[in-house]
């Protein structure tokens, strides 16, 4: 078989780290989207978005449909990764409470 290159190994390690950070369970990876909850889907979407090491992440109402506990968990992880890795975050939200907790600058439209 083929041996994974250093880039592939690094990408896999990054994906594994993100899966762990967001609490993604291994069995979720074998399920179809309709078999996952909204929180599970959002966790996987965030892992996918961050696994390519973006310079900016645009989060447009990304957690609006989730319960408050799940929202808090996901934003805690996102903000920790953002602070550690230094990528930019553009948050679009109708929630003043969320914007107040997450944003360092605000533009109201």
Image: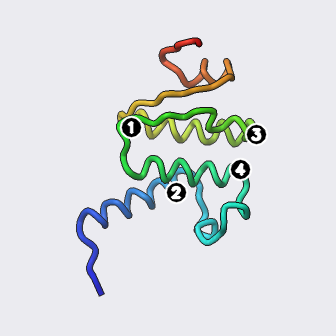
Q: Farthest residue toward the left?
A: 6
Closer to the eye: label 3 or 4 = 4
Q: CA distance from mark 2 to mark 4?
A: 18 Å
Residue 77, x across and y down, in percent: 54, 41
Closer to the eye: label 1 or 4 = 4
Q: Farthest residue toward the top?
A: 108
Q: Residue at x 64, y 53 (%)?
A: 41
Residue 46, x across and y down, in percent: 53, 47
The residue that mark 4 highlights is 38
Closer to the eye: label 2 or 4 = 4
Closer to the eye: label 3 or 1 = 3
Left or right of 83? Residue 66 is right
Q: How many other residues sit within 10 Å of disc 3, few (<14), some (14-19) or many (≥20)?
A: few
Q: CA distance from mark 2 to mark 1?
A: 16 Å
**In the rendered structure, which disc, 2 or 4, sits on the residue that comes first in sequence?**
2
Q: Farthest residue toward the right?
A: 67
Q: CA distance from mark 1 to mark 4?
A: 26 Å
Q: Secondary structure at mark 2?
A: helix
Q: Residue at x 63, y 33 (%)?
A: 61
Q: Are marks 3 and 4 in contact (CB under 8 Å)?
A: no
- Where the N terminus falls, by quadrant? bottom left
The residue that mark 3 highlights is 67
The residue that mark 1 highlights is 84
Q: CA distance from mark 3 to mark 4?
A: 9 Å
Left or right of 100? Residue 64 is right
Q: Residue at x 56, y 50 (%)?
A: 45
**In the rendered structure, which disc, 2 or 1, sits on the residue that comes first in sequence?**
2
Q: Mark number for residue 20?
A: 2
Q: Secondary structure at mark 3?
A: loop
**In the rendered structure, which disc, 3 or 2, sits on the residue that comes first in sequence?**
2
Q: Are marks 2 and 1 in contact (CB under 8 Å)?
A: no
């Amino acid at each position: 078989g083929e041996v994974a290159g250093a880039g592939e190994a690094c990408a896999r390690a990054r994906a594994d780290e993100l899966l762990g950070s967001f609490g993604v369970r291994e069995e979720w990876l074998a399920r179809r989207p309709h078999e996952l909850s909204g929180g599970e889907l959002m966790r996987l979407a965030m892992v996918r978005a961050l696994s390519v090491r973006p310079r900016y992440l645009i989060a447009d109402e990304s957690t609006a449909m989730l319960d408050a506990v799940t929202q808090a968990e996901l934003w805690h992880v996102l903000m920790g990764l953002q602070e550690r890795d230094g990528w930019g975050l553009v948050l679009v939200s109708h929630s003043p409470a969320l914007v107040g907790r997450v944003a360092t600058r605000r533009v109201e439209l």
